[in-house]
Image (cartoon, grey):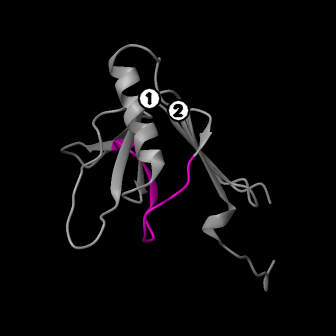
Amino acid sequence: MAGQMRTYSFTHHMIMINGREIENFGEGDDVITAEYREDRVTDTVGADGNMQASVSANQSAEVMIKLLNMAPENDYLESLHQQFVNGEIAGISVSVINAVTGQGVLSTTGYISKIANFARGTNAQDREWTIIVPKLAILQSVV
């Protein structure tokens, strides 16, 4: 329908990692990103110009989260990483849901491959975490 107005606000989003709500995000327009690790469909073109498409079963993804340098959530994620390495937990799951539209991402249980980089200087630097998951579902709007 023409003429509709929609509003976006980051405050509409709820981010959960292993059941804990995450806050204290860094600055910028990319504090949360989710992307598949490879193309889902690839193609091959034969010498005669005919094409075939191949659909990959790989639905693995990376979810990147930027947090303020001094955020207590950094300690929580470091703890989850260490627990996973020690075999104390089976993995790490993440969900990002827009409470207004229902859009977002849900993951199966994955892992944090390394502790976020640590940098100090004149200004505090954000810390970026990457959670690698075997399967990611991107939810479409329900409105």
The x, y position of residue 120, in whole percent, is 21, 61
Residue 130 showing in the rendered view:
yes
What residue type is disc 1 on?
A: Gly
Tell whether label 1 touches label 2 (CB within 8 Å): yes
Magenta stretch encompasses residue 39: yes
Residue at the far bottom in the pictured view: 3
**Label 2 Cα crowd, 10 Å radius (few <14 / some 14-19 / many 20+):** some
Magenta stretch encompasses residue 69: no
**Label 1 Cα crowd, 10 Å radius (few <14 / some 14-19 / many 20+):** many
Image-quadrant location for residue 122: bottom left
Asked which secondary structure carries label 2, the reply is loop
Is 95 located above or below residue 120 in the figure? above
The x, y position of residue 100, in whole percent, is 76, 61
- Which residue sits at x=43%, y=14%? 88
- Which residue sits at x=47%, y=46%? 73
The image quadrant where one finds the N terminus is bottom right
Q: Which residue is mark 1?
A: 110
Asked which secondary structure carries label 1, the reply is loop
The image quadrant where one finds the C terminus is bottom right
The x, y position of residue 68, in whole percent, is 41, 60
Is 35 located above or below residue 61 in the figure? below
Examine the residues drawn in magenta and state their main secondary structure: loop
Q: Which residue is mark 2?
A: 93
- Which residue sits at x=43%, y=30%? 80
Residue 61 showing in the rendered view:
no
Q: Which residues are magenta?
A: 22-42
